[in-house]
Image (cartoon, rainbow, N blue to C red):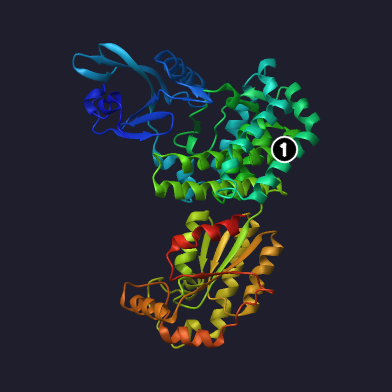
């Protein structure tokens, strides 16, 4: 799609007062963002959706000013102000002389590696930082004054309008990103809660818990560089910004769960409520987490029908939407609970490749018996140990120790509320039973995926592996043959499972597997 002239012009470093070394363009469906080494400039697109109208220069100027004003509440030093984009004899530039043709919000650029989402994914976030974030948001909520005009946004009738709008807008995605069963359960939970808790919703509206807050607190909008800064508040629609304070914090609580960090979600919630002392608000946390997850699922689903979105991004958006609707369904059916997936199969059947791909798509932890075995043995992961079947670190005693450690680590993650994939041969029924018991003990959902492939495919894979770069797996053809002799096959009526032919392209079975796991 052709970029507008003003956007093309602002891709040139000479268009900026400080003459940056480089300019990077990023887009959302409502904004153009220009990143220089020191600053970020946001220009609003001249679009008109049901929830916003940026179609005139005057409106865009107004909403730029509102964005700065509102965001200075939680990120004061980041929002430098509104600057005019001028067109003069020497071209288009930020500031300078000429006719004002556009406006931009000027922000200080924050380090990407210090964004909360990056910290979570990188495993660098600490409990103490999460506690500070919870306290910052809580103090903000406590200081925002309530008003009768804002209070109406917390009434059951208004909330119902919002939730029913979500359901109507996702009708076309039933069976695509949200299953029929999920849609029904979530809708039933939402409607029943609004009816049953009507007095509580009205009590909170009357009691000053409905405020003009942030509206979009998720981990992409939180920086932990030199303090806590929360930016990108919703400025374009007051209805999205005015809500119960618990609804506002529920967005980030849900986001921690989405990143498979329910342990951090609990830390965040505890820190938040320790400050607000809002005991009745806790009763609505699951409801609002369900609402927030559903909205995110809806937004990701919309991308499936947008012509400008590429096929790969549509596929990724579909997976993200499925994950959000899965979360919404969990909140509506008793609350968040983790999942344990066993990916098993004989050596060379592709179980580790599949397990790693699923872990990435689902955001689950991935534990491999090959890696655990070598760690226990004090062997570097890539060091080959081509020992005879059942000998050395592959003898019965060491194998039992390996599975004990694998299952123990998996259960520890489940106890913390974190979903996990266990990647191992699991040839014995007793081992699979132990995994299922661990899942039941921790209230987790349990799935078994069996990887299979033609022997010719297995033989080729194992030959390529032995001749290729060092691998954590020591599997060879003779090991496959011995494993096959001793394998205890799964019985569907006793051990429900999914079977995957890994010789087929991954895209042939990815969505069906995710639908089963997340459905």
- Seen at 73% across and 42% down, the residue is 188
Vertical side of 459 occupied by 217: above or below: above
Residue behind mark 1: 282
Name the side, left or right, on which 404 lies relative to 92. Answer: right
Vertical side of 123 occupied by 81: above or below: above
Q: Secondary structure at mark 1?
A: helix
Q: Position of residue 476 (x, y in %)?
A: 41, 82
Vertical side of 476 occupied by 154: above or below: above
- Seen at 55% across and 57% down, the residue is 514
Q: Nearer the viewer, residue 195 or 377?
A: 195
Q: Position of residue 54 (x, y in %)?
A: 45, 20
Q: Nearer the viewer, residue 6 or 178?
A: 178
Residue 336 at least partly seen: no
- Seen at 48% across and 46% down, the residue is 317
Name the side, left or right, on which 476 lies relative to 88. Answer: right
Q: Position of residue 475 (x, y in %)?
A: 43, 79
């Amino acid at each position: 799609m052709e970029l507008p002239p003003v956007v093309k012009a602002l891709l040139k470093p000479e268009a900026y007062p400080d003459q940056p070394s480089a300019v990077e363009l990023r887009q959302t469906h409502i904004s153009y963002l220009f990143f220089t080494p020191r600053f970020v400039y946001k220009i609003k697109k001249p679009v008109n959706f049901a929830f916003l109208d940026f179609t005139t220069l005057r409106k865009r100027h107004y909403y730029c000013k509102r964005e700065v004003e509102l965001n200075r509440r939680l990120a004061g030093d980041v929002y430098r102000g509104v600057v005019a984009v001028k067109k003069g004899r020497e071209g288009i530039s930020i500031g300078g002389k000429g006719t004002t043709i556009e406006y931009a919000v000027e922000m200080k650029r924050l380090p990407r590696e210090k964004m909360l989402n990056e910290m979570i994914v990188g495993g660098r976030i600490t409990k103490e930082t999460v506690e500070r974030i919870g306290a910052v948001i809580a103090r903000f909520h406590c200081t925002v004054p309530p008003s009768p005009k804002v209070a109406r946004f917390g009434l059951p009738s208004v909330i119902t309008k919002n939730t029913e709008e979500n359901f109507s807008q996702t009708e076309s995605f039933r069976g695509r990103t949200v299953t029929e069963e999920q849609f029904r359960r979530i809708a039933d939970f939402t409607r029943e809660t609004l009816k049953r808790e009507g007095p509580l919703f009205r009590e909170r509206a009357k009691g000053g818990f409905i405020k003009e807050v942030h509206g979009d607190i998720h981990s992409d909008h939180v920086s932990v560089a030199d303090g806590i800064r929360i930016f990108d508040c919703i400025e374009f629609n007051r209805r999205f910004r005015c809500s119960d304070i618990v609804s506002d914090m529920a967005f980030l609580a849900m986001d921690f769960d989405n990143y498979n960090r329910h342990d951090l979600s609990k830390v965040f919630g505890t820190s938040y409520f320790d400050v607000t002392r809002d005991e009745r608000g806790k009763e609505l946390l699951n409801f609002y987490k369900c609402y927030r997850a559903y909205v995110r699922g809806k937004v990701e689903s919309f991308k499936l029908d947008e012509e400008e979105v590429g096929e790969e991004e549509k596929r990724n958006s579909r997976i993200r939407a499925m994950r959000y609707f899965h979360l919404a369904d969990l909140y509506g059916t008793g609350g968040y609970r983790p999942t344990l997936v066993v990916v098993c199969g004989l050596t060379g059947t592709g179980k580790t490749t599949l397990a790693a791909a699923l872990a990435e798509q689902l955001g689950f932890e991935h534990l491999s018996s090959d890696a655990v075995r070598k760690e226990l043995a004090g062997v570097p992961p890539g060091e080959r140990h081509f020992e005879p079947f059942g000998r050395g670190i592959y003898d019965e005693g060491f194998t039992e120790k390996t599975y004990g450690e694998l299952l123990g680590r998996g259960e520890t993650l489940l106890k913390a509320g974190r979903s996990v994939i266990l990647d191992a041969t699991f040839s014995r029924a007793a081992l699979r039973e132990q995994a299922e018991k661990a899942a039941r003990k921790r209230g987790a959902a349990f799935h078994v995926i069996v990887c299979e492939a033609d022997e010719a495919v297995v033989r080729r894979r194992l030959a390529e592996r032995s001749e290729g770069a060092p691998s954590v797996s020591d599997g060879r053809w003779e090991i496959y043959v011995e494993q096959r002799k001793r394998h205890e096959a799964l019985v569907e009526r006793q051990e429900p499972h999914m079977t995957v032919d890994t010789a087929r392209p991954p895209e042939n079975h990815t969505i069906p597997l995710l639908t089963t796991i997340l459905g």
